[in-house]
Amino acid sequence: MTPGLRGKAIRSSAINSVLSMLLKALLFGQVVLFTRLFTPDEYGQLTTVLLIISFATLLGRMGLNEAMVRESRNPREVLNTAFALSLWIAAGLAALLVVLSPVLAAVFRRPELAHHLRFLAVMVFIIPFELPTMLWVRELQFGRSKYASFADILVSTVVTVVLHLGFHLGVLSLLVGRLSGFVVGQGFAWAMLPYRPHPKLHREHAISLYHFGWPLAISALCNFAIYQMDDVFVRLFWGDQNLAYYTLAFALPYYLKEFTDLMVSSLLPIYSKLSDAHERARTAFVEVNRYLGIAMAPLGLALFFFAEPLTLLIFGEKWRPTIPVLRVFAWGFTIETLGGYSWGMLVVARGKTKLSLIAKSANAAFLLTVGAFLIWKFGVMGGAWAMLGHAVMSVLIIRPLILYRELGNLYYLRDSWKPLVAAVVAGYISVFITRWLPAGAPALLVSMTSYIVLYAGLYVLIDRPILQDTRAIASVLAHRPGD
């Protein structure tokens, strides 16, 4: 990676991470506010509708966003074609949701769901409306690409609260607020766009977009199978209570995974710019894998070492059965982030979406067969072991096969042991140091602080060049691009 691109990548990734965390915080605040203002039944109705619409949107994106980020020859011409295709796709999905709304309402045993779905079906038009913002992402302008999301959250929150407190509209407040946020957010972003596409279908571009996108659409379904079907199996085989234990144990590692995904998402435009420079791409991938391991391995293993005090302090004694499950999930997340986690962005940037499809299909097949059996036989622990097996299979088998083909070597794995060893040693020492302290928040704070300090010190001993790298990154972040 050239110094100029490296600096731009570091700055843009930092901006993307900060803005993404701020968005997550605002969303969390909105959830807390709404759960206090509305009954579980009212808020559950909105959640169910959004779940259905999100699934429809997932199907309809067809990899068009990723295609626009990596397009370098005729981005505006290709955007016109992608916009035309996405308009047709969104219109078809909206019509399908309206037609199927009574059926979906019957499946979820909620008659009023049909009316809610018809009201919010227009939200699938986010598929074409968000496409032009990918031009910002392509140029690493992540702040501008998030205009719509910030406006959406603020407007939907204000409208919902005003309608609920001023007019007592109940669940209708949530629905109108959600639609208002969507319309204003997308309208605001559209007004700020550097280029507004026109629906103009070009046959050659359409064929190219289809060949690139259909594997990503199926990969999205595989992701749904990987991260949602285990919940379904737990509910079917073991009931509501065990599902509650399972989803709570998965929640903390999943938040870490979401944060990691947000950081990795900024790599698509960077890898796209390096798609024709094999050696620079390989160097960038190795560097990214190293920094991800340094940052995320201690966080993942912190959930393993402090699973018991965290669970009991935050959720209470009644959630003790989640502790062993959380520990297994923590190892699964840690292993997954150490072994080429950004591989998906690399193969998509190179246009090899079928490789992504093959990998996701293999993982989905494993979890739908072996995972289902383990859950049926061993309950929530079986589900945790299945997810750990999925992580091991990905890191040791699937990713190396793909990355050796793409990079020509497996050098990205050579430093993966360092953060793992540092985190394990630091964890056991910190737990040993504080084991005689009385249980509670002070003991947990002391233990986690000692863990962080020990990890940092041990990692520096193992990998001395990290000090120089840290100073270089801090220097890049401290200077503006024009300095």
Image: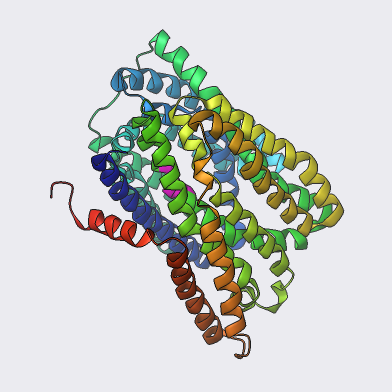
Tell whether position 264 is magenta. Answer: yes
Q: Relative to residue 291, is residue 414 drawn left or right?
A: right
When the figure is inspected, residue 286 is found, relative to residue 167, above or below; the finding is above
Q: Name the residue located 50 percent from the left edge and 29 percent from the top edge.
A: 406
Characterize the magenta stretch by its predominant secondary structure. Answer: helix
**Residue ranking furthest to the left:** 483
Residue farthest top in this picture: 203
Q: Nearer the viewer, residue 193 or 104?
A: 193
Residue 137 falls in which quadrant of the image?
top left
Residue at 63% across, 85% down: 435
In the rendered image, residue 333, in percent from the top left (x then y), is placed at 60, 55
Is 230 part of what is drawn in magenta? no
Viewer-proximal residue among 76 and 457: 457
The magenta-colored residue range is 261-265
Does 389 appear above or below 24?
Answer: above
Q: Position of residue 135 (x, y in %)?
A: 30, 32
Seen from the viewer's position, the closer of residues 259 and 160 is: 259
Q: Quadrant of the N terminus?
A: top left
- Above/below status of 184 relative to 80: below
Residue 160 lies left or right of residue 231; in this view the side is left
Q: Residue at x 63, y 37 (%)?
A: 398
Tell me if residue 209 can be seen: yes
User: Residue sitting at 49 percent across and 65 percent down?
Assistant: 32
**Colour treatment of the image:** rainbow
